[in-house]
Amino acid sequence: MTKAATPAQTAALIVKTDRAFRPLVRLVGPPPRRRAAPSDQRFAALVRSITFQLLATNAANTIHQRVVAACGGEVTVERVIGVGPDPLRSAGLSNAKARAMVELAEGVAGDRVSLTRHGRMSDREVIEDVSSIRGIGPWTAQMYLMFTLARQDVWPAGDYGVRSGWTIVHGMDEIVSEEDLRIAGEGFPGVRSALAWYCWRAADLAKQSR
């Protein structure tokens, strides 16, 4: 699957590879078309991903709003450095997350983390770059690749929502393991970001039907 593939073509390939997705694709349609964010928005997007690590969506949104407020309404490298970790912790962040945000800001300011060059780097290079900051792990890097850089072949097999959605789509009695899901994803090269989106939609629809 090339980068020029349309969302409809992507959906068709997923269904062709695994027919268990056919009812879901018919219900929700093709995946969203994403565009890479400008380089000046990448820092704020990474900060948001750090906030959302291991938190439920509603709680994460509330804390992130407080983080934005602590930064004077705009999350920038300069403002995070100026604010420092204590006000970020007061916004509801853990010590580790507050430190990660400040270290990320310092890394970007010192050009140790190359946000402006991420668009020209491979997925693996981007993950290595952002994960050089203590407190930024694979999940945060994967969300950044998917939602900020619009990369099409990211497979967050460790994400609980993706695991849940895959389990629901396939009618499994027990939630699929991260390792089994990682292996299953190997059958969908080039479209795994969209595949993850479908898994999230399956999990969301299941919650709504309860």
Image: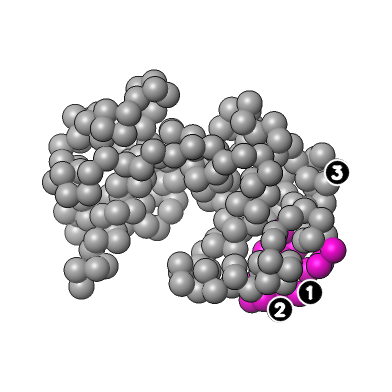
Which percent across, then down, holds residue 76?
74, 55
Quadrant in which the N terminus is drawn:
top left
Q: Residue at x 59, y 28 (%)?
A: 122
Tell whether label 1 touches label 2 (CB within 8 Å).
Answer: yes
Q: Which residues are magenta?
A: 82-101
Q: Secondary structure at mark 1?
A: helix
Which percent across, then down, holds residue 33?
39, 38
Q: Amino acid at mark 3?
A: Gly
> Quadrant of residue 96 in the image?
bottom right
Reading the image, the residue beneath label 3 is 110
Sequence-wise, the earlier of marks 3 and 1 is 1
Which percent across, then down, holds residue 25?
20, 43
Q: Residue at x 66, y 39 (%)?
A: 39
* Structural distance between the alpha carbons of marks 3 and 1: 22 Å
Q: Which mark is residue 10?
A: none
Reading the image, the residue beneath label 1 is 86
Reading the image, the residue beneath label 2 is 90
